[in-house]
């Protein structure tokens, strides 16, 4: 089983593009229960939560909108899961470009574990989505084009 610090080190390595390229800062990570590790990044307008359920479905990425200085609720209209975004991109035909260009994240080192492979895969997806800022904004207003 992976420790909390090992998880945070993996996330910091593969998601450093949020800080380097998009001027996000790491939010002090929460001390969740022993079955959930969570690390968040914010740019003041959005909070990106990268969590790992040890006995669950692996890494989950959720984008929260910041409203009046506060993070939106987990499943309200101002929150979207990366999986939902990817589904909408497939439906709109915008994922074809991702598969053609798949060189968004250059890892510092190749992933060794299944968790690192999943972290890299989702980092690549998130990086692609971050380049589609208008698409994310439209998702938050539910006006997907």
Image (tube, grey):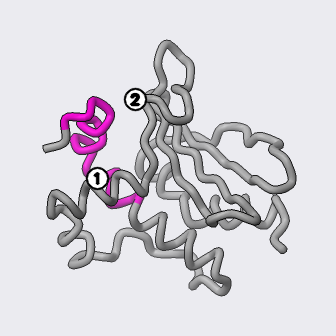
Task: From the viewer's perspective, tell me whether residue 145 is left or right of residue 39.
Answer: left
The percent position of residue 25, horizontal first and vertical second, equals 57, 40
Mark 1: few/some/many CA within 10 Å (<14, 14-19, 20+): few
In the picture, the quarter occupied by the N terminus is bottom right
Task: From the viewer's perspective, tell me whether residue 23 is left or right of residue 144.
Answer: right
Q: Would you identify the image quadrant in which residue 140 lies? A: top left
Secondary element type, mark 2: loop
In the picture, the quarter occupied by the C terminus is top left
Q: Is residue 140 magenta?
A: yes
Q: Is residue 104 above or below residue 140?
A: below
Marks 2 and 1 sit apart, C-alpha to C-alpha, by 22 Å
Secondary element type, mark 1: loop
Which residue was labeled with disc 1? 131
Q: Which residues are magenta?
A: 126-143
The percent position of residue 141, horizontal first and vertical second, equals 27, 29
Q: Which mark is residue 142?
A: none
User: Which residue is at a point 36% across and 69% down the rendered structure image?
Assistant: 104
Q: Which mark is residue 77?
A: 2
The percent position of residue 118, horizontal first and vertical second, equals 56, 73
Please, which residue is most extreme toward the top here? Answer: 68
Q: Is residue 92 above or below residue 74?
A: below
């Amino acid at each position: 089983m992976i420790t909390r610090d090992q998880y945070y080190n993996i996330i910091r390595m593969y998601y450093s593009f949020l800080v380097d390229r998009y001027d996000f800062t790491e939010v002090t990570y929460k001390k969740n229960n022993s079955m959930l590790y969570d690390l968040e990044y914010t740019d003041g307008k959005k909070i990106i939560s990268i969590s790992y359920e040890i006995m669950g479905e692996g890494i989950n990425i959720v984008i929260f909108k910041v409203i009046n200085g506060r993070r939106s609720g987990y499943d309200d209209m101002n929150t979207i899961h990366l999986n939902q975004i990817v589904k909408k991109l497939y439906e709109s035909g915008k994922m074809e470009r991702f598969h053609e260009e798949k060189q968004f994240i250059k890892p510092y080192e190749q992933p060794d574990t299944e968790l690192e492979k999943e972290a890299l895969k989702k980092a690549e997806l998130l990086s692609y989505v971050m380049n589609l800022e208008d698409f994310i904004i439209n998702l938050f207003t539910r006006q997907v084009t």
